[in-house]
Image (tube, rainbow, N blue to C red):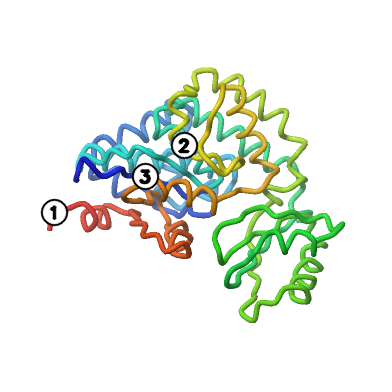
Amino acid sequence: MASDIINAVVFPGQGSQRSGMGKDFFEAMPESRRAFEEAADALGWDVGAVCFGDDPRLDLTEYTQPCLVATEIAMLRGLAARYGFSPRLFGGHSLGEFTALVAAGALPFAACLNIVQRRGRLMQSAVPVGVGAMTAVIADDLDPAAIAPLLGSLAVDIANVNSRRQVVLSGEAGAIGEAEERLRAGLTAPSLRFVRLNVSAPFHSRFLEPIGAPFREVLGEWGFSLDPERAVAVVSNYRGGFHQGSREEIFASLALQLSHTVQWKANMAALAAQAGALWEIGPGRPLRDFFRTLDVACTSVTSVASAEKAFAPT
C-alpha cells in the first residue's frame, strides 16, 4: 500500500451481523484467530462459536455488540498483518464507534468488549419489546431541519442522519406511523419512502435517556485507560466531528450517543476531508452506499476473498 496516502477506516454497527461472520479470517489468519481467543478470555464465553455457528444469541443485543466488535477487530488485525494496512483516521456507526476507538489504540480491546456487552444489556432493558420502533426515511436530498418541525409533539426523534438520502426516526411504536404520515404530507419529495427497521428498542431516542447515567458508570469502571490523545483520530457520532477534550468529555459523548442523533453524514464529511482513501471493514457493508451519496468512494472488505481483491497487487 502507498505509505503517503492517509487511510481512514469505518466500521458498521448493529444490524450488520450475520451467522458465520469472521470465520474465514479466523481460519486464514493467525492474528484474527488470536483476536477471537482474546475476546473469549475477556468475556468468559466463546465469542467465535456464537459468531460462526447458527447461534440465536447472535441477534440478542448483549451478545451482538461484543461479537461485532470482536469480528471487526479480528478482521482489522488480519489485514494489518497480511497487507500492512495501517489507517490513521477512524470512524464507526453507532456501536462501530467503539470498534473505531479500539482500532485507533484509544481503548483496550478487552475493556471495550466488556463495555459494549454491558451497553447492549442496558439498551435492551431500557424499553420493553414492542413499545418502540424505528423507520428509515428515504428520499433524495433529505433535510433533517425540515423533518424535525413536522414531528411536533410526537414521541419520535431523529435517530440517525445517515446520508443525503436517509434519515432514521426512532420512538414510540404507535407514533411512528403518524410521523410517516406527517412526512408524506409535509415533505416535497416524490421519491419518498419508508422502511421499518427490525429492532428491539427505539435506539438513539429520548427513550434511552434513563440508561445514560448507568452507562457512564460502566465507562468509568472499564474505560479508565481510554487515551484521549489517540481518540482525536476518531469521529464522534454525537458531536459530528472528531473527538476532543478529556476522558470525561469523551465518556459524555459516548453516553449521549445512546439517546441522541447519530451524526453520520457529518462524520463521513469529516473523514473524507482528511483521508486519501476510505475503507469499510466488517461483516456487512451498509456504510459504502452512504459515502456514495457524498460522491466519496469507500472500499468494503467483508471477507478474506474481498480483502484479496482489494489489497492484492495487480
Q: Amino acid at mark 2?
A: Val
Horizontally, residue 137 falls left or right of residue 78, namely right
Name the residue carrying label 1: 313
Residue sitting at 70 percent across and 59 percent down?
A: 145
Badge number at residue 8? 3
Query: The N terminus lies in which quarter of the figure?
Result: top left
Distance from Cα at disc 1 to Cα at disc 3: 20 Å
Q: Amino acid at mark 3?
A: Ala
Q: Secondary structure at mark 1?
A: loop
Distance from Cα at disc 2 to Cα at disc 3: 10 Å
Above or below 112: residue 141? below
Q: Are marks 2 and 1 in contact (CB under 8 Å)?
A: no
Q: Secondary structure at mark 2?
A: loop
Residue located farthest toward the front when viewing the structure as drawn: 273
Badge number at residue 234? 2
Above or below 61: residue 243? above
Distance from Cα at disc 2 to Cα at disc 1: 29 Å
Between 291 and 64, the one lying in front of the other is 291
Crowding at dot 2, Cα within 10 Å, few <14 / some 14-19 / many 20+, comes out as: many
